[in-house]
Amino acid sequence: MNGPTTTEGAATPSRRMWWILGWCVLVLFAGIAAYALPWADVLTALAGAQWHWALLAVFVSLAGWPFWILQWQLLAPKAHRPSFSRMAQVTALSGAANTSLPMTGVVASVGFLIVRGRLPPSAAASVYTVDQLMTGIGKVATLALAALLVPVPDWIRSGLLTLSGIMALVTVALLVAAHGGQRLRRLGIGLGARPARLISHVADFVDHLEPLRSPLLTAAVLALAFAKAGVEVLLVMTVQVAVGIAPSVAAAVLVVAALDLATIAPVSPGHLGVFEATVILCYQYLGVPLPVATAAALIHHGALFGASLVGLGYLGWALPRDESGARRLDQP
């Protein structure tokens, strides 16, 4: 591979369409916010915030990064498992892509697992698939906990039921598929070269679903998913202290649960607009004044962006350079 470290080439029409849609959504939310929010009171709330707690929120957000790295390490097949430092680079790249590329972060994440993580394509796809399964299960658990702790809005309760049904179906399907690699290969015997090659690729993907064939490994990966959710709850509580909201586990779980639903589809860069609106609605539902709720949303999202900048700084230090001094993904 030659040239810069990021995905190269002209954007495809599909990718360009999602990019345009994402920024349109962001502009729409910005326009609504400009007219609907009491910005003088919001600025007063921000000025009165305890900014050392806001800074602490950045470090709390970073505390979830090692759990993400370990999770993807365990999900990678043993024969191709990257080192901790290399997987740290992969997750930092993936986080940056998810922040800046609406609807294309999935493709970018799998690409980084292949190029920087040095995983075969089928193994990279399996890592991301099982990661999303475990993340989905964690979201269901967070939503269920929120429903137990506070009387949640109807849209969250409906989302819990819908997501629970989807995750149950996906879990059963992947558990069954994880043991079917050899059966798939037998199906390809006697077929033409192209169908047999396609079936072989699918079988390779199934063979790499190792965590789903090991209850202990599945439990470890799921525990890491829950640990990441716990860090998100702690982050929300840190922001609550920063803006003067009485820290509440129940309120924090509600915010995390609502964000889990609202940000499933990344329709704007970094979920800008969607993120803030969701946090504000949660705090308004709990009786928090609008200016304080808005300040909490801005500081919360700002802490996440601050953590992502730390990840980019790590990439600037860790990624190797070629002879011209450019950062390269494909070098040792």
Image (spheres, helix red, strand yellow):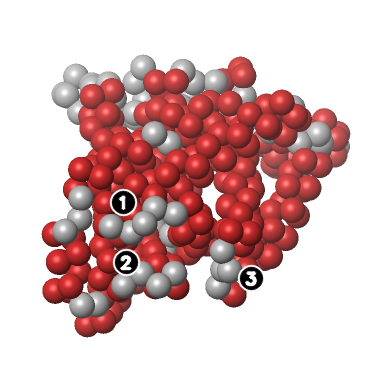
Q: Circle 1 sits on which residue?
A: 241
Residue, far front:
246
Q: Secondary structure at mark 3?
A: helix
Question: Taking 168 as reference, is 52 left or right?
Answer: left
Seen from the viewer's position, the closer of residues 242 and 84 is 242
Residue 123 x/y as whole percent: 60, 31
Q: Residue at x 61, y 54 (%)?
A: 145
The numbered mark, 2 or 1, whose residue comes first in the sequence reads 1
Q: Secondary structure at mark 2?
A: helix
Residue, far bottom:
35
Label 2 vs label 1, nearer the camera: 1
Q: Secondary structure at mark 1?
A: helix
Q: Circle 3 sits on which residue?
A: 158
Q: Residue at x 17, y 73 (%)?
A: 41
- Label placed on residue 257: none
Question: Taking 231 as reference, is 220 left or right?
Answer: right
The amino acid sitting under disc 3 is: Ser
Question: Taking 313 as reference, is 72 left or right?
Answer: right
Residue 153 x/y as whole percent: 55, 73
Q: Circle 2 sits on which residue?
A: 293
Residue 42 x/y as whole percent: 20, 69
Cα–Cα span, label 2 and label 1: 12 Å
The numbered mark, 2 or 3, whose residue comes first in the sequence reads 3
Q: Residue at x 82, y 30 (%)?
A: 182
The amino acid sitting under disc 2 is: Ala
Counting other residues with Cα less than 10 Å from the Cα at mark 2, is it few (<14), some (14-19), or many (20 or more)? Answer: many
Counting other residues with Cα less than 10 Å from the Cα at mark 1, is it few (<14), some (14-19), or many (20 or more)? Answer: some
Cα–Cα span, label 2 and label 3: 24 Å
Residue 88 x/y as whole percent: 40, 28
The numbered mark, 3 or 1, whose residue comes first in the sequence reads 3
| In this view, 229 is above or below 127 | below
